[in-house]
Image (cartoon, rainbow, N blue to C red):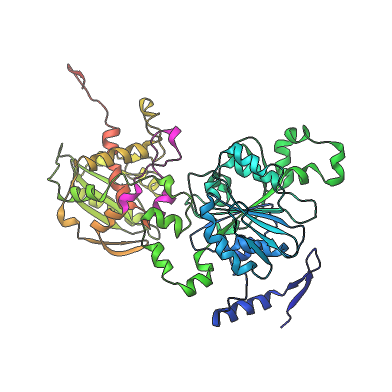
Amino acid sequence: MEKYSGIKTVNASLVLDYEYIQMLRDADRKIPNPNKIIAQGGGQENMLSTPADITICGGCRGGSKTFTLLMETLKDIKNKNFRSVLLRHEIDDLSDMVETSSTLYDDFGEYNKSKNDMRWNFYKGGFLKFSYHADTLDDFKKRFQGKQFAYIGVDEITHMEYLKFKYLITCNRNAFHIRNRFIGTCNPDPDSWVAKFIDWWIGEDGLPIPERDGRVRYCFMDGDNVSGIYWGDTREEVYEQCKDIIHAYWKPEYEQYGTPQELFIKSVTFIEAKLSDNVKLMSSDPTYLANLVNQSDEQRARDLDGNWKYKAAGDDIIKLTHMEALYRNSMQIGDGIRRVSCDAAFEGGDSLVMWLWEGWHIRDIFVCKLDSKKTVDTVKAMLEEWHVREECFTYDLNGLGQIFKGFFPNAIPFNNKEAVEEKFKYIYANLKSQAAYLFAQKIINREISIEPTLLERKFSGKGFEKVPLRQILDKERKAIRKDEDSEEKGWTIIKKIIMKKLVGHSPDFIEALLMRMIFEIKHKRKHIKGLGLI
């Protein structure tokens, strides 16, 4: 096996062959050697090999993000002109990083332990400084004014203000032809500016999009807010959006150094860090995984799943205590009218779920997975068996429910995206959000009841098998949450894709239940002769 690939770096160093590197990794797994520093596959390798000017590496805890920040320095540790800095929020936050750094740098330099000058002085002349960013913006600028660093790394960059990040970018420079790069690492924080900065790389479910992992994009960061950034897939695409701003600062004498696109526009990437990639940690302490799993739903979503939008789902509205009260509640017959609410689905997809209501009491449930013709026939049969008039039947109009429209002309279709009444337009985003909120209030206020015998009946669906109804409802209650990112639209229920992430499957049972509210929302006043409107 060849040791070197035949490729050389810009400073004429030989590049190891990839098969040889993999051989070193395999050998280290069998007999760990602390003296061998080998980049692990996955996030660490991607982070160390990206050509981007700015790299954000985020993901679950234990993804070896901090250690990778330290490894980046090794590329230029023998360059006498190399200047670098690593930051955390507070000085005291640096202790673990400093301690770990000795495993990498002991053979290359000496560490100055003074808190006034925490830095590695490398034997060849370069240095790595440890610093912090907890002071005010003005004080921070004073400390870094005039400083030059070819490499800047920020651990837990979500703790850093956006304006401090932007100011640090002005310090990312050198006059010695060393490649400038900025790397920020973090765990997911949906409230941070970083979440907005990397939004293109993150899916609606809050998880990194695999095919975009490590993909380089370009940006021009205008103004003092992350929303002022111009983005594009090419430098030219960004340039076309903000060329008026760039031209205002362009001078002919700059042409010898490059084009406006090359000089003014930054390359950016996001790289996901996974615990599963950190073979070193998992092989030495496999119980760390259990430590992450034994946390709250929100903590697990961020620390283990690497979810950037979990908090956007808000908190549970319907608590387990509310569900227990529902199960024990006395019969809430109300007007006594029999109604059916149905979440439509056909064979091959999720389950069709039908609930029989008597007033506000849940009398029965029917679940099936059939083809479209059999489903329509079966629904008709169930309405007849349950003695429910067609006008007291509602179904999900969106998606597969469209097929019902021609077979149940007198039913009340439930259109998720339908606008609310004019007077409610600043209160609820749409009909589904209104129904979900009102249904949750009914549960909380103990205005709904259910036949106790239904709770132990078992059902199967996509992602679960033979689970008691009680457990299904306890889990699916999590789907009724407020989307915290849609304040300006009124109360908005979270997107379906986030529901599935929270619940583990499509919340068909709870969605069919909340559709019951359509009969209250759509209730029309009747004009009775001689009595006027009532």
Residue 503, magenta (yes or no): no
Q: Which residue is most to the left? A: 330
- Provide residue 256's location: percent of width, then percent of height: 87, 45
Q: In this rendering, is residue 231 above or below 506?
A: above
Residue depicted at 21% across the width and 48% down the height: 384
- Provide residue 434's location: percent of width, then percent of height: 34, 36
Instruction: Check the picture and name the quadrant holding the N terminus.
Output: bottom right
Residue 371 lies left or right of residue 39; in this view the side is left
Q: How many marks?
A: 0
- Provide residue 128's location: percent of width, then percent of height: 66, 58
Q: In which image quadrant can residue 162 be found?
A: top right
Q: In this picture, which residue range is highlighted in magenta?
A: 476-502
Q: In which image quadrant can residue 163 be found?
A: top right
Residue 485, magenta (yes or no): yes
Residue 259 lies left or right of residue 107; in this view the side is right
Residue 383 visible, this angle: no
Closest to the observer, 197 or 420? 197
Closest to the observer, 48 or 115? 115
Closest to the observer, 381 or 57? 57
Q: In which image quadrant can residue 397 be found?
A: top left
- Provide residue 446's location: percent of width, then percent of height: 19, 42
Closest to the observer, 346 or 473? 473
Residue depicted at 75% across the width and 76% down the height: 4
Residue 165 lies left or right of residue 351; in this view the side is right
Instruction: Check the picture and name the quadrant holding the C terminus.
Output: top left
Residue depicted at 83% across the width and 46% down the height: 258
Residue depicted at 81% across the width and 44% down the height: 259
Residue 525 visible, this angle: yes
